[in-house]
Image: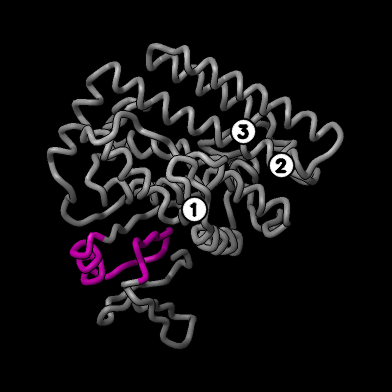
């Protein structure tokens, strides 16, 4: 929910959406909502918040730019023995390294897929540049395999991210958008503004999946433990960013489903989505979550909304000792 002045109320087994300037009753069945994401100016009543907590339905608050602010969940799910195994793995150098390598490898592989799929429909210098960037990422995968410490893994991940985002202008079909690589906090161009917003939505989905499985979102393997930072959610996000967020952003821009009028520049030079722009992106996000994606490891298609939960369960199985290794989500 993103329109300022909107309030959410519990009405039986539905959410009643009220806005003083809108007529009619808008009811959303709770059974169809796996989470609630609220933006600034949207309020929720205590009885609805408590019902969501009882149902283990997380409620998250984001800024207008998609930056995470707060989250309310119900009681902790899962077996405490699973979280204990997760903590032990995080303290074991070899296991932590292996998990970090798997997650970064999944990210780099899927980044290559974004580049190669776009290159198929491109031509000339643009196609050559995209294929050259994809080849660079293949080399980073080889380099990743030779790492022995977390710092080295982070180093390779940083290099691969630099190579990938250097190709960002070639991933955009028009000359309207000219991002200077990846920038954030704050994003200083519309493309990075859109990416940051979608990463915020992805973080909510991934953290919710981890909590549903019973994993501790704050104890990760690639990202270090810091107060208030959900390290494991950030870890698991890595393999999803290229296809679930980046590709959606590119589609919206290349198909002109969002345009310059959907962004506004603030006095400090930062960009943010307008109310209309945010509505368009949220609608596209919800639609994209219904898309089925190939899962190379499971050898079947999985709906985008379910992918974080599938990977959280695969991670839990590995941490419990049911599988020898964690397999990240990749597409063929």
Give the side of residue 166 with respect to residue 122, left or right: left
Q: Split into 4 quadrants, where in the image is the N terminus?
A: bottom left
Q: Is residue 234 magenta?
A: no
Q: In percent of the image, x 84 and y 38: which residue is there?
A: 123
Q: Residue at x 42, y 24 (%)?
A: 101
Residue interval drawn in magenta: 32-56
Task: Tell me residue 41's x, y (percent).
Answer: 41, 63
Residue corresponding to mark 3? 112
For the question of whether residue 130 can be seen, the reply is yes
Q: Is residue 16 above or below residue 105?
A: below
Give the number of the mark in front: 1 or 2: 1
- Location of residue 235 by image quarter: top left
Q: Nearer the viewer, residue 155 or 175?
A: 155
Please say if the residues under marks 1 and 2 sit with CB atoms less than 8 Å apart.
no
The numbered mark at residue 42 is none
Q: Disc 1 on helix, strand or loop?
A: strand
Residue 286 drawn at (x, y percent): 50, 62
The residues tagged by marks 3 and 2 sit, at their Cα atoms, a distance apart of 10 Å
Residue 82, percent across and down? 18, 38
């Amino acid at each position: 929910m993103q329109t300022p002045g909107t309030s959410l109320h519990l009405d039986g087994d539905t959410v009643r959406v009220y806005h003083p300037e809108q007529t009619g009753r808008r009811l959303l069945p709770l059974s169809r909502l796996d989470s609630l994401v609220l933006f600034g100016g949207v309020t929720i009543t205590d009885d609805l918040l408590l019902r969501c907590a009882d149902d283990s339905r997380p409620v998250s608050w984001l800024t207008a730019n998609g930056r995470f602010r707060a989250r309310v969940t119900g009681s902790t799910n899962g077996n405490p023995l699973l979280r204990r195994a997760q903590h032990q793995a995080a303290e074991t150098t070899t296991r932590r390294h292996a998990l970090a390598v798997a997650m970064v490898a999944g990210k780099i592989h899927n980044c290559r897929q974004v580049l190669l799929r776009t290159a198929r429909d491109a031509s000339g210098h643009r196609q050559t540049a995209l294929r050259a960037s994809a080849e660079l990422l293949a080399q980073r995968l080889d380099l990743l395999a030779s790492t022995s410490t977390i710092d080295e893994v982070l180093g390779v991940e940083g290099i691969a991210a630099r190579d990938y985002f250097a190709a960002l202008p070639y991933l955009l079909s028009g000359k309207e958008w000219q991002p200077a690589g990846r920038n954030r906090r704050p994003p200083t161009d519309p493309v990075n503004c859109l990416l940051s917003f979608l990463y915020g939505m992805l973080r909510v989905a991934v953290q919710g999946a981890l909590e549903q499985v019973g994993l501790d979102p704050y104890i990760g393997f690639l990202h270090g433990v810091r107060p208030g930072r959900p390290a494991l959610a950030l870890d698991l996000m890595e393999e999803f960013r290229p296809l679930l967020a980046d590709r959606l952003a590119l589609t919206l821009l290349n198909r002109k489903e969002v345009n310059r009028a959907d962004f506004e520049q603030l006095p400090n030079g930062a960009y943010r989505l307008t109310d209309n722009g945010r509505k368009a992106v949220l609608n596209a996000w919800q639609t994209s979550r219904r898309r089925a994606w190939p899962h190379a490891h499971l050898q079947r298609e999985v709906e985008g909304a379910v992918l974080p939960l599938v990977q959280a369960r695969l991670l839990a199985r590995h941490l419990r000792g049911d599988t020898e290794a964690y397999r990240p989500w990749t597409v063929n």
